[in-house]
């Protein structure tokens, strides 16, 4: 039987996860466990800034050559920053795997950060910040995390502020890299039609001169939480609202149960309880959803809705009604079975997207130092009981624990 994936660790501590798929296109990425939560208030936005300027030149390539290297053969090169990770990744025809791997590692380990390029990129990122501020339905998610994690890096915006971005110097970039980009905090993920041993051997060749280096950053634990309600006047037509709470860390045994509960309440399916009982029944909102974002040592659960200001309070009361149902009414056997089948189907279909699969495999290895097979995931979900769901609902959705952030028209 073909292995679902294979895992290797190189002598310098970088881990490799490989999944062979019989497709003409391959995908790979370098994942670094360093993100915006590793910053200080003075360096807010630095991890994201580094993600940008990594592409501005290496010891052997100028920015133009970096950007053209994959596109010249019809491939794609990209990167992103989260609160806990930075990722550089590429998609390409299978025969171009060496080109993609060599380029990603050149960017990750040999970038030179020319002062002229740093200066230009500051303006680009400030434009990105201003563009983001024009999207209240996106901005409110970050402001909600700031409400849950005041005076903590998890509450800071990934993009930073215009003031912090303007202040960055090359020395700040190099200092962050030295402290955060340890080889013990890196994973290389590959999904494509090339044998695992071939990828491992080529990776070792490319990284032969990179020594083992442990990252020295120590992450700050979240501060004690208390629930809050905050209303902000904004130049918006709709009211935007998020209600939620801190939640379980990624490796908490109850995290899987909360994923299931989140999917049932307001996941991507049009048959979620929030969608059926608020959008479809009353027509109060075009967009209503719930979300669960786990971090290494905590998490965020929330419900977002955009609605007419005249129906905002009624929408909140209907949300409260759905949360009360989950806290007080145990799911029946058929309801629970349907909820499990739905999320398992979504997981299976997500694994058909090989870019998403490559990123998910790398993230799992980076966070947990392990990867569950689909069978293991299925067994864990099948073991969840209706009582487990009710217990989690009462812990996370307790009314006195929920914080609320509202954007209302000025």
Image (cartoon, helix red, strand yellow):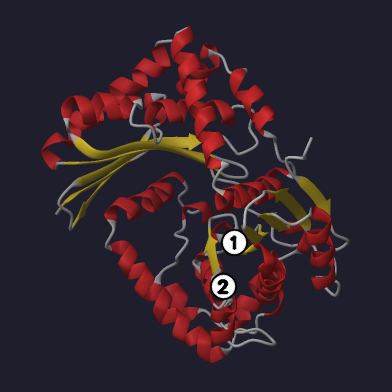
Q: Which residue is mark 2?
A: 50
Q: Position of residue 52 (x, y in %)?
A: 52, 74
Could one spot residue 4 in this view of the protein?
A: yes
Q: Counting residues from the N terminus, which is met first, the one under dot 1 or under dot 2?
A: 2
Q: Position of residue 169 (x, y in %)?
A: 55, 82
Q: Residues within 10 Å of mark 2 (few under 14, many from 20)?
A: many
Along the horizontal axis of the image, is 143 left or right of 79? left
Could you give the CA–CA distance between mark 1 and mark 2, rounded to whole angstroms? Answer: 9 Å
Residue 224 visible within the image: no
395 shown above or below 304: above
The image position of residue 126, as x and y in percent, is 38, 75
Q: Is residue 64 left or right of residue 363?
A: left
Quadrant where the N terminus is found in the figure: top right
Mark 1–mark 2 CB contact (< 8 Å): yes
In percent of width and height, residue 304 lies at 32, 40
User: Taking 246 as reference, is 157 above or below it?
Assistant: below
Number of labels in the image equals: 2
Query: Within 10 angstroms of label 1, few (less than 14), some, or many (20 or more) residues?
Result: many
Name the secondary structure under disc 2: helix
Q: Kindly identify the residue that appears in the image at 65 percent across and 32 percent down.
A: 374
Q: Please, which residue is most extreme toward the right here?
A: 11
User: Residue at the spot x=56%, y=14% of the render?
Assistant: 385
Q: Nearer the viewer, residue 374 or 290?
A: 374
Which residue is tagged 1?
86
Q: Nearer the viewer, residue 370 or 327?
A: 370
Query: Toward which corner of the image does residue 60 lie, by quadrant?
Result: bottom right
* Helix, strand or loop for disc 1: strand
């Amino acid at each position: 039987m073909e292995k679902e994936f294979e895992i290797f660790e190189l002598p310098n501590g970088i881990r490799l996860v490989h999944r062979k798929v019989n497709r003409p296109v391959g995908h790979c990425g370098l994942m670094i466990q360093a993100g915006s939560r590793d910053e200080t208030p003075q360096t807010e936005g630095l991890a994201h800034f580094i993600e940008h300027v990594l592409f501005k030149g290496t010891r052997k390539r100028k920015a133009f050559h970096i950007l053209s290297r994959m596109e010249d053969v019809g491939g794609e090169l990209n990167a992103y920053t989260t609160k806990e990770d930075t990722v550089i990744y590429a998609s390409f025809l299978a025969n171009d795997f060496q080109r993609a791997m060599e380029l990603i590692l050149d960017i990750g380990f040999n970038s030179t950060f020319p002062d002229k390029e740093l200066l230009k990129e500051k303006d680009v990122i400030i434009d990105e910040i201003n563009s983001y501020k024009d999207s209240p339905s996106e901005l409110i998610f970050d402001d909600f995390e700031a409400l849950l994690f005041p005076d903590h890096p998890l509450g800071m915006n990934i993009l930073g502020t215009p003031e912090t971005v303007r202040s960055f110097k090359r020395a700040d970039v190099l200092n962050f890299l030295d402290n955060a980009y340890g080889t013990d905090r890196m994973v290389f993920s590959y999904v494509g039609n090339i044998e695992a041993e071939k990828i491992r051997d080529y990776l070792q060749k490319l990284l032969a001169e990179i020594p083992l280096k442990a990252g020295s950053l120590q992450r700050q634990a979240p501060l004690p939480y208390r629930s809050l309600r905050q209303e902000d006047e904004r130049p918006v037509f709709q009211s935007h609202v998020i209600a939620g709470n801190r939640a379980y860390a990624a490796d908490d045994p109850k995290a899987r149960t909360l994923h299931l509960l989140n999917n049932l309440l307001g996941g991507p399916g049009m048959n979620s309880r929030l969608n059926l009982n608020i959008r479809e029944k009353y027509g109060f909102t075009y967009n209503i959803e719930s979300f669960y974002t786990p971090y290494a040592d905590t998490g965020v659960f929330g419900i977002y809705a955009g609605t007419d200001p005249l129906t905002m309070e009624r929408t909140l009361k209907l949300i409260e009604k759905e949360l009360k149902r989950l806290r007080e009414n145990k799911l029946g056997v058929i309801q629970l079975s349907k909820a499990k089948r739905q999320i398992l189907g979504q997981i299976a279909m997500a694994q058909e997207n090989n870019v998403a699969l490559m990123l998910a495999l790398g993230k799992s290895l980076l966070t947990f130092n392990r990867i569950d097979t689909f069978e293991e995931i299925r067994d864990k979900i099948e073991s969840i009981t209706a009582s487990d769901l009710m217990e989690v609902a009462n812990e996370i959705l307790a009314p006195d624990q929920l914080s609320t952030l509202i954007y209302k028209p000025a």
